[in-house]
Amino acid sequence: NAAARRVLGNHVWQHSAFKDVDKARIDVTHYEALSENDLEEIEKFANKMIRENLKVLKTFIPRHIAEKRYGFGIYQGGAAPEKELRIVQIRNGITDTEACSGTHLDHTKDAGEITIIGSERIQDGIVRIEFVAGEAAQRYRKMQNDIISLSCQILGTTESGLVDSAKSLFERWKFLRKE
């Protein structure tokens, strides 16, 4: 969320999030679909925070004090119903501060790495970013490399020639289909 806000602008607000063992997603407010460059920059900034091994601070604070101290920005993704809020901060709130009852790491480095695997505009003003982290990111990268290797093997080419071989095969298929 902090990486998306940093790259896209302060108008970004977490709409919702979902985390599973194999992949996760975050839905954020934004006025247009994300470009490949946007996704690369978000991923780059998120991984920079991971490499910096920032401490993730978690404290319980009465709701009225938390709202006065941090404002309503702590309710990214929705309001928490508790009278005492668990406030989660990265870099003493400089990077991100939210009320959250979920599980959180103690340091950003514990996430391993983040790989964004896709993005789509799910409704007007809401963009979904799907990603994998840690071991799931390593499995995803291995799967992608396996697909590339198998494709090269099938087409009898190298990685650098893969795109040209695929284009050539497609053009040949279109030609034969017409005949």
Image (cartoon, rainbow, N blue to C red):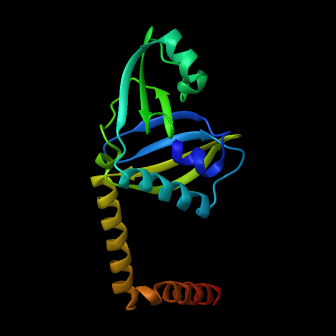
Q: From the viewer's perspective, is residue 46 above or below residue 92? A: below
Residue 55 sits above or below residue 86 on the image: below
- Residue at the image position 44 percent from the left and 34 percent from the top: 92
For the residue pair 172 and 94, the one nearer the viewer reads as: 94
In the picture shown, does residue 72 fall above or below 110?
A: above
Residue drawn at (63%, 54%), measured in percent from left and top?
34
Please name whichever residue, 139 or 44, is drawn nearer the observer in this view of the structure: 44
Q: Is residue 40 above or below residue 98?
A: below
90 relative position to 1: left or right: left
Image quadrant holding the C terminus, namely bottom right
Q: Position of residue 45 (x, y in %)?
A: 49, 55
Which x, y percent locates residue 158? 39, 90
The residue depicted at 50 percent of the width and 36 percent of the height is: 96
Image label count:
0
| 73 displayed left or right of 160 | right
Residue 154 placed where, x, y %? 36, 85
Classify residue 122 by image quadrant: top right
